[in-house]
Image (spheres, helix red, strand yellow):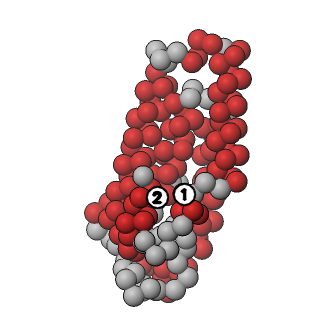
Amino acid sequence: MEYVIQYHFHPDTTDSLSFLITKEYLIAFSFGAIEYLVECYFFPYKCTFSNVFIYIGLSLIAIGLTIRFTAIIQAGKSFTHLIAYYKRPEHKLITTGIYKYIRHPSYLGYLIFAVGTQIYLTNVISPIGFYIVLYLFFKDRIREEEIYLVEMFPEYAAYRARTPTWMFI
């Protein structure tokens, strides 16, 4: 779905890297899958559909994807998967819609989605690990990205001051 949205707004620059399936992504989700299989083997009762964590996880997955896709669609051509180091002609600062309430909503949506996948699998270690790794990744990425956003959009400083990320960053 994300690839389709990316292609809609950026058909000239969308390629196989737009699938966002990196080595780190595969390692993280492989760890989650292995944890799930090991825990189900030793604790089979945890892998039943009567487990409340499955429904909590599904809810978080849905909420995370809704936030992320809403952010990407509302940003339109201003959204890219890579940090923008210069202002493109079609690049605009988006401060309305979901961006009025959440700074970097696509990051927050992804964080909620990723942690939700691990809660859905009723994993014990991976939700914490995913949160910590993504928190650190987004913390560094936001710090770098906002340097360029302030340069490109002087009004970004005021937007940043009034709009939280909701990621404890």
Residue 159 place in picture, x, y as percent: 38, 73
Q: Is residue 73 left or right of residue 110?
A: left
Q: Quadrant of the C terminus?
A: bottom right
Which residue bears the numbered disc 2? 3
Q: Are marks 1 and 2 in contact (CB under 8 Å)?
A: yes
> Does residue 142 appear in this view?
no
- For the point 54% across and 44% down, the residue is 114
Q: Is residue 152 above or below residue 37?
A: below
How would you rate the neighbour count of disc 2 (Cα within 10 Å): few for under 14, some for 14-19, many for 20 or more? Answer: some
Residue 34 place in picture, x, y as percent: 70, 31
- For the point 59% across and 11% down, the residue is 45
Q: CA distance from mark 1 to mark 2?
A: 6 Å
- For the point 44% across and 39% down, the residue is 60
Q: Amino acid at mark 2?
A: Tyr
Which residue occupies the foreground of this view, 41 or 11?
11
Q: Amino acid at mark 1?
A: Phe
Residue 30 place in picture, x, y as percent: 68, 39
How would you rate the neighbour count of disc 1 (Cα within 10 Å): few for under 14, some for 14-19, many for 20 or more? Answer: some
Which residue is outermost to the top? 45
Q: Secondary structure at mark 1?
A: helix
> Does residue 23 appear in this view?
yes
Which label was assigned to residue 157? none
- For the point 55% across and 82% down, the residue is 85
Which residue bears the numbered disc 1? 19
